Image (cartoon, grey):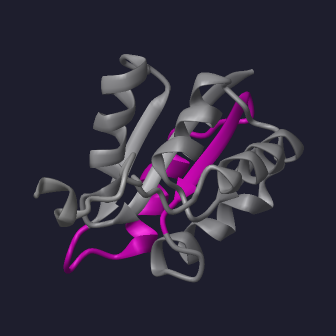
């Protein structure tokens, strides 16, 4: 089975995500990006993706927003047993899936759980509190 990964989004997000991924992990021959541009129709975008998916393809579609027009249109592809659609895509999630060439729903769910744990607020605390009285 051939594995193919598709990044889909509104506007340029998917293309930028692909560029960021390939900057970090190198060029990926089986990674494609599609962005719905103003005036475009999501069904046309999904038809273009569908042309890449054959019976001997394991496909993972990584979309931007659950409930958004692009992912809603892509949902029809999930009637195929060889297609998994994931929403809420970000760089760490896409990187883990693509580096591992992961296509099973169960394994992707584990990656989603791990990536969620990496989402946090980071702050830098000073090593010591400044006290202006110490200068005199």
User: Extreme left residue here?
Assistant: 136
The residue shown at (26%, 66%) is 11
Task: Classify 102 as above or below 64.
Answer: above
Q: Is residue 51 visible?
A: yes
Which residue occupies the foreground of this view, 26 or 132? 132
Is 63 situated left or right of 87 in this image?
Answer: left
Q: Position of residue 112 (x, y in %)?
A: 72, 51
Query: Per the image, is 58 magenta?
Result: yes
The residue shown at (66%, 48%) is 115
Which residue occupies the foreground of this view, 37 or 66? 66
Which residue occupies the foreground of this view, 14 or 116? 116
The image quarter in which residue 85 lies: bottom right
Task: Classify 86 as above or below 32.
Answer: below
The residue shown at (43%, 20%) is 25
The residue shown at (64%, 35%) is 97
The mark tally for this picture is 0
The image quarter in which residue 82 lies: top right
Q: Is residue 82 visible?
A: no
Is 2 situated left or right of 89 in this image?
Answer: right
Query: Per the image, is 124 magenta?
Result: no
Q: Quadrant of the N terminus?
A: top right
Task: Classify 66 as above or below 94.
Answer: below
Residue stretch rendered in magenta on the structure = 37-64
């Amino acid at each position: 089975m051939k594995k193919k990964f598709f990044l889909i989004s509104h506007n340029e997000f998917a293309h930028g995500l692909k560029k960021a991924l390939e900057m970090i992990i190198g060029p990926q021959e089986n990674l494609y990006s599609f962005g719905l541009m103003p005036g475009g129709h999501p069904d046309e975008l999904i038809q273009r993706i569908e042309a890449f998916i054959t019976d001997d393809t394991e496909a993972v579609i990584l979309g931007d927003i659950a409930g958004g027009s692009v992912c809603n249109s892509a949902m029809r592809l999930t009637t195929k047993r060889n297609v998994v659609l994931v929403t809420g895509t970000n760089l760490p999630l896409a990187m883990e899936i693509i580096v591992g060439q992961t296509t099973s729903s169960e394994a992707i769910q584990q990656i989603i759980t791990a990536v969620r744990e990496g989402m946090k607020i980071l702050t830098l605390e000073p090593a010591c509190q400044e006290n202006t009285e110490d200068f005199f």
